Amino acid sequence: MSKKNTGLFLVTAVLIFASMADAQQPTKLNRIGLLAGGHGLGSAGEALRVGLRDFGWVEGRNIQIESRLAELNLEKLPQLASELVRIKVAVIVADGDPAIRAAKQATGSIPIVGISPGDLVRERLVASLARPGGNITGLTSISVDLSGKRLELINEAFPKARRVAVLWNPANPSNALEYKEMESAAQALGLKLQPLKVGAQGELRGAFAAAIRDRANALIVARDTLIDSQHFQIMDFAIDKRLPSIYGEMQFVEAGGLMSYGPSRLELFRRAAVFVDKILNGRQPADLPVEQPMKFEFVVNLKTAKQIGLTVPPNVLVRAQKVIR
């Protein structure tokens, strides 16, 4: 064999062995922490996984998802957040303001992608939408501003409903801001609000009793982990008492609620995957602008309307993006 051919053979052999060595190296698993206050994320969690797969992040191949759920005991969130920090996740996806706050308290360095039903700026979780600063970015639904719109829809659809009960959690800062916004809207519309405060398990029955006692004739349900977990009881109550009701998410209407207005939760979680992908590829959360939903869905369930003997006016129905018949 000539010296030239020998050299070519050696180079080829080195390349082959290097390629084999690379193939034998296990792919790095990036740990992604999921922090939430409820029992699980359900279809929203699947929407996140689908979004991640679109960017090539697949569980068991190059990512490992570590879920920490508070099971409605929000006092556990700080401990759960600390667990995610301890196992050195690359990024934390935090669902809801209590989870975002717990993650923020647990770490100032691990990136946090928050999915907030409220206003991250007004709650001082980020410095601004354009430049969040710190280690938090994500999506803000700004439901504080949407609460007045929900009240307007109830008023327009059912003008005879002059006393509107509002089911909300006073321990949730987003809910507190939301209720203030509704108070201003109610004054402008000439409506009377009845606050139904639910801050712990077991308080829902008392809230229902208060609504009956004070003769509420419509119901608005705020977005909150504790309240969301009891949505079947809430919907059963509204149907039983024939109360027009409106929620912040379409899933409630699909489950039997009357109306909803707000951003798609599934879309928010799909968008969260965009942030996770950028962070895993080296971007800093401080430089990733917080996103606001661009599309809002008004959904009406005519089956429920018929069940409780209500007619949704055509001028309201025509504005719905989805009608369940």
Image: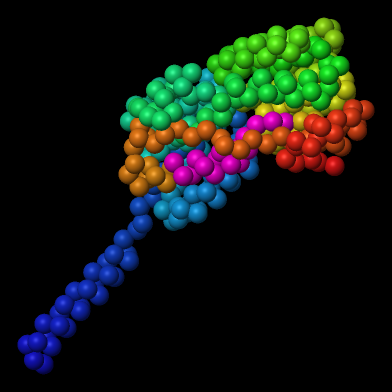
Residue 253, compared with residue 151, is above or below; it is below
Task: Name the one closer to the observer, 238 or 226.
Answer: 238
Give x and y (percent) for residue 103: 43, 27
Q: Quadrant of residue 153?
A: top right
Q: Quadrant of residue 269?
A: top right
Can see residue 211?
no
Residue 98 locus on image (x, y percent):
52, 23
Q: Which residue sits at x=32%, y=65%?
A: 24
Name the residue nearer the viewer: 253 or 40: 253
Q: What type of secondary structure mainly makes up the magenta span?
A: helix
Over which residues does the magenta segment extend?
260-275
The extreme right residue here reads: 309
Q: Quadrant of residue 14?
A: bottom left
Left or right, 170 with reference to 237: left
Nearest the camera: 108 or 325? 325
Protein image colouring: rainbow
| Residue visible at 20% across and 79% down in the picture | 12
- Position of 116 with respect to 39 (left or right) is left
Residue drawn at the location 65% of the way across and 11% of the way down: 184
Quarter of the rendering occupied by the C terminus:
top right
Is 43 magenta? The answer is no
Q: Is residue 29 left or right of residue 76?
A: left
Magenta stretch encompasses residue 267? yes
* Residue 14 visible, this orientation: yes
Residue 198 locus on image (x, y percent): 67, 15
Q: Nearer the viewer, residue 279 or 108?
A: 279
Looking at the image, the residue that sits furthest to the top is: 214
- The residue under the point 35% across, 47% down is 281
- From the top left corner, tell me how far across and down residue 1 is, in percent: 11, 92
- In the rendered view, tell whether residue 265 sits above or below residue 170: below
